[in-house]
Image (cartoon, helix red, strand yellow):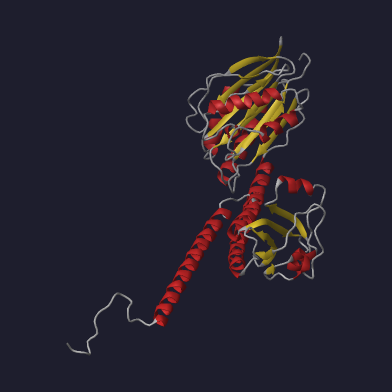
Amino acid sequence: MNSDVQPTGAPGEGERPELRLDLGEQLEGVAVQLRALARAKNRLQGLLSAVLAIGGDLDLPVVLHRIVTTAMDLAGAHYGALGVLAPSGDRLEQFVTAGLTEEEYAALAGIDFPHGRGVLGHLIRHPGPLRVDDIPSHPSSVGFPPGHPPMRTLLGVAITVRGEIYGDLYLAERIDGLPFDEDDEEIVRALAGAAGIAIENARLFGYMRDSAEQFQRLLLPTLPELGPFDGAAVYRTAAEPAGVGGDWYDAAVLPDRACVAVIGDVVGHDLHAAAAMAQARNMLRALLYDRRSPPSSVLTQLDHTVGAITDLPVTTACLARIEPSADGWTLHWSTAGHPPPLVLTPDGRARYVQGEPGIPLGVDPEIPRPDHTHPLPAGSTVVLFTDGLVEHPERSIDEGLDTLAALAAAHATRPLDDLVHVLADHHPSDGHDDMAILAIRVPTGHP
């Protein structure tokens, strides 16, 4: 046997101990790196989900609260807040909080929200990221107000919108008890960048919504003096951006002592619908004053007139005359594909006065529309409304109408302005269409 040939032993025999140690350390290092990569991947996925979450709504208060809660989730923080700077930039004018329990909120009852003193003010004056491991020991600390939960650690980052600091995002107390670290700071700073975009989108949406509503209100009339009748109206724009639309109403007392009320809805939510609405309303007012025709005849004349002058989109409408009669008052109405009038009696009952509906305007002006009449007790209220008040994708239109009638009955005797606002505030629809309400109350005395 050749003495230079060594017999083969069991695995690992003949290896140097230090090589086995080096290999074990390397494997442990690889395992640490893999765990770190997994954590980084999870955090990145969490950041992406957070960005989607804060950008998923356009209502500014909702967006601000969601920024706070998503930041808390990303950093594992027990408490969170977002302080919105005043226009002067030297103090907070709004403070959105999350994480406090009901008991903690109750303990702070009567305490004004922070305006930017102490450590919070330090971040206002020095808008770079701020990590504090012991808040009471920080040079800027001025202590907490009575009832404030104890907090030791803090992470703060500024939120910038269009190049200007909008506010500061604060996180306190990591759930695991450790101070906030560089990874927490990095991911919250990334979230703050996305938060600035979400805030700007919400602000732009709010501006567009407010501008659309203001424009719509400028097109709608201020109800004239309707004595001896009483009248009130309210309009609410759609929840979608650029919600200017085609809902409209009008009312007037005519020379024959009848009160005429009309409500309509031009299909569409754009400037074309709004312009068509204004044209139809103005033409209808002229037609009403020009003749004492039945409502169906006036609607047909409007259909012919508008169709000859302009390109009117499909429009629904309900035109009603509240006329004096020998026995009191009579509701004389006709519809063009519109929901029926709702009548509230002084004893708190509510019912829809049903009748065969006519076809909408803009379809075929040659097709006649029927007229209907219904006696009205003195003191009754006639409510006209657009379908945006009752339509909901998850419920039938009948359910919406029933809910509205029950709501109206519960408030039937309230002053008219209160009544229309209650109906608008507590409507059964999903709020994704503009809505208009017009209410006329019949005098309590004999005509």
Q: Position of residue 263 (x, y in %)?
A: 62, 31
Left or right, 230 with reference to 264 = right
Residue 410 location, quadrant: top right
- Work out whether residue 291 can be spotted: no
Left or right, 270 with reference to 325 = left
Q: Quadrant of the C terminus?
A: top right
* Total marks placed: 0
Residue 379 location, quadrant: top right
Residue 261 location, quadrant: top right
Q: Position of residue 154 (x, y in %)?
A: 69, 64
Please give the name of the residue rendered at 48% of the width and 70% of the height, measured from the top-left corner: 32
Q: Position of residue 186 (x, y in %)?
A: 59, 68
Seen as rendered, the residue at the extreme left is 1
- Does residue 299 sit above or below 179 in this rendering? above
Please give the name of the residue rendered at 62% of the width and 54% of the height, measured from the top-left corner: 69
Please give the name of the residue rendered at 22% of the width and 90% of the height, measured from the top-left corner: 4
Q: Quadrant of the N terminus?
A: bottom left
- Work out whether residue 365 can be spotted: yes
- Viewer-closest of 4 and 242: 4
- Viewer-closest of 174 and 444: 174
Left or right, 84 with reference to 294 = right
Please give the name of the residue rendered at 55% of the width and 35% of the height, measured from the top-left corner: 306
- Does residue 114 sit above or below 378 in this rendering? below
Seen as rendered, the residue at the extreme top is 327
Left or right, 333 with reference to 13 = right
- Viewer-closest of 344 and 164: 164
Q: Position of residue 68 (x, y in %)?
A: 64, 56
